[in-house]
Amino acid sequence: MAADKDRLHSFLAEFFRYAFVGGTAFLIDYGILFLTQRYIFNGLGDTGVYIATALGFISGLVYNYILSVVYVFKSAAKDKKGRTVTAFFLFALIGVIGLVLTEAGMYAGYQLLHIHYLVVKIFVAAIVLIWNYAARKLLIFR
């Protein structure tokens, strides 16, 4: 019973660290999306939104990887898990799937439902956060 409680506490602490890192990665992602769409890709119309979305996502991905290895997954940091080329490849592959989910969500919300792209991004990011955590936990940082 105590072991289950400790495991639950450990899981929740790790998930909250991931949510914090994911939240700050989201701010980087969102900021780059906003800035590049507004100041760099504005003249490209809808295509500019998707390019800016990808740039923001990639920036958040790199930030998230670094902090996941050193801060979020404590046991992985001690065991040096996640610091191999294979682990980074898996991390990036999960991120690419997250990017596809992000772009699909942006398309559905922005293009089909005509919701402002910055509003859509908030909802899409919440869904992708859960995907990213679960996949990375299971495949890289067990």
Image: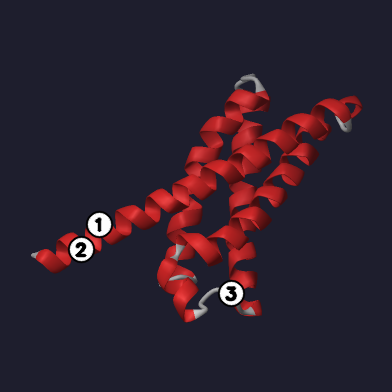
Q: In this view, does 135 lie above or below 107?
A: below
Q: Which of marks 3 and 1 is nearer the N terminus?
A: 1
- How is the protein colored in the picture? secondary structure
Q: How crowded is mark 2: few (under 14 residues within 10 Å), some or many (20 or more)?
A: few
Tell me what residue is drawn at x 52 percent, y 49 percent.
21
Q: What SS does tag 1 mark?
A: helix
Amino acid type, callout 3: Ala
- Give whichever of 69, 129 is nearer the camera: 69
Query: Image quadrant of residue 87?
Result: bottom right
Q: In this view, does 54 lie above or below 63?
A: above
Query: Image quadrant of residue 106?
Result: top right
**Is the residue under label 3 in contact with that under label 2 (CB below 8 Å)?**
no
Q: Name the residue under label 3.
A: 87
The spot of residue 51 in percent (x, y) is 80, 40
The spot of residue 102 in percent (x, y) is 61, 42
Amino acid type, callout 1: His
The numbered disc on residue 6 is: 2
Count up the numbered dots.
3
Q: In this view, does 97 lie to the left or right of 51?
A: left
Tell me what residue is drawn at x 55 percent, y 73 percent.
82
Q: Is residue 103 left or right of residue 15?
A: right
Tell me what residue is drawn at x 68 percent, y 26 percent.
111
Tell me what residue is drawn at x 23 percent, y 64 percent.
7
Q: Name the residue under label 1.
A: 9
**Is the residue under label 2 in contact with that under label 1 (CB below 8 Å)?**
yes
Q: Distance between the residues labelled 1 and 2?
A: 5 Å
